[in-house]
Amino acid sequence: MGDYEWAEFATNLAGRYIQLVSEELAPRLQPEGFQVSPSRSGDDIEVRFGGQVPSFPQLTRVIDIYVEPLRDWMGFTAYARVVSAEVGEVIGGLAESAQLTDWADPGAELGLVELAGFDGFINAGPYGAFALRDESSVRGAADWVLEGVSGPVGEWFSQRDDVTKLLGLAKYPRPRSVDQVNPDAELLRATVVLCLLNDRLVDGAGLMGWYLGTGRFSVFDSFERAGVRCRAV
C-alpha cells in the first residue's frame, strides 16, 4: 500500500471511529446537557458536543473530540472549551490590527473563551491520546470522556460559568500551558467583551487597564494590538 493509499485508508478509518464514538457518546452525554453540534472544521475526524450554560446563556460548554492515526493505532483526544457566539461577533468585527496574531487562521474560533485538554485532568495514554486499537476500544474511550465530565472537567466548566468567575481567572496564565508567565490573552479579551455586553463597564475597563499596564503579553498579543482593541470596543 502506497503512502497515498495508506493516508486515504487511515482517514476513512478515523472517520469510522468518529461515527462510532458519536453514536456511543450522544445518549450518554445528553443527561449532562450536551448534544451533537456542528464541528469547527466540518471534518469527518472530529465531533463536537455542545451545551448552553443555563445560568449564563451567552456561554456554551463544548466538548471537541478528535481521532487521528498514530502509528499502528488511532489516537482519541478530547478538549473542553467555553465559547460565546456573542463574543465571536464582537471580536470578528474588529480591525485586523486589534486581533491576536494567530486569529488570522480562518479555522480559528473567535468566540473561544477558555480551553483545556481532557488529558490534563485524566491520564489517557501515550502522547496524551486514548488508544483506539479496535472498535471494542470505543466504549472505553467514551467511559474516559464521561469520567472527565462527571469529575474534574465538569468542575472546570463550573468554574467558568459566569462573568465574575471569569474575571477571577483572567489575570493568570492558562493552566498547563507552555506560557506560565503572561495572562491568557484569549480569556482576558473575551472576558472584557462579556463585561461590556453585560453592562459591567467598570469591570471591563479595569481589567483592560490592568492588562495594558502590566506590559506582559504572550507571543500572540502586544501592547499595540491590545490598545487598538481597547479603543475599538
Image: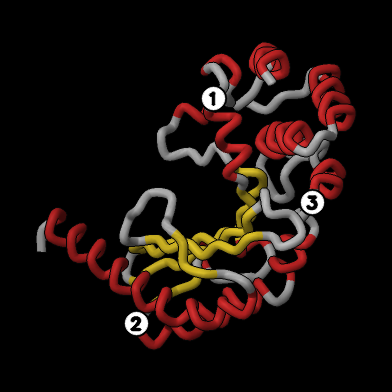
Pointer 2 residue: 134
Q: CA distance from mark 3 to mark 2?
A: 41 Å
User: Quick check: can you spot residue 144?
Assistant: no
Pointer 3 residue: 162
> What quarter of the picture does the N terminus occupy?
bottom left
Vertical position of residue 219 compared to residue 138: above or below: above
Vertical position of residue 18 compared to residue 37: above or below: below
Q: Please give the name of the residue rendered at 55% of the width and 37% of the height, measured from the top-left corner.
A: 110
Say few, some or many: other residues with alpha carbon within 10 Å of mark 2 (under 14 / 14 to 19 / 20 or more). Answer: few
The amino acid type, in three-letter code, at marker 3 is Asp
The amino acid type, in three-letter code, at marker 1 is Gly
- Where, by quadrant of the figure, is residue 197 drawn? top right
Q: CA distance from mark 1 to mark 2?
A: 45 Å
Q: Secondary structure at mark 1?
A: loop
Tell me which label, 3 or 2, sits earlier in the chain: 2
Identify which residue, 134 or 114, lies in the foreground: 114
Q: Secondary structure at mark 2?
A: loop
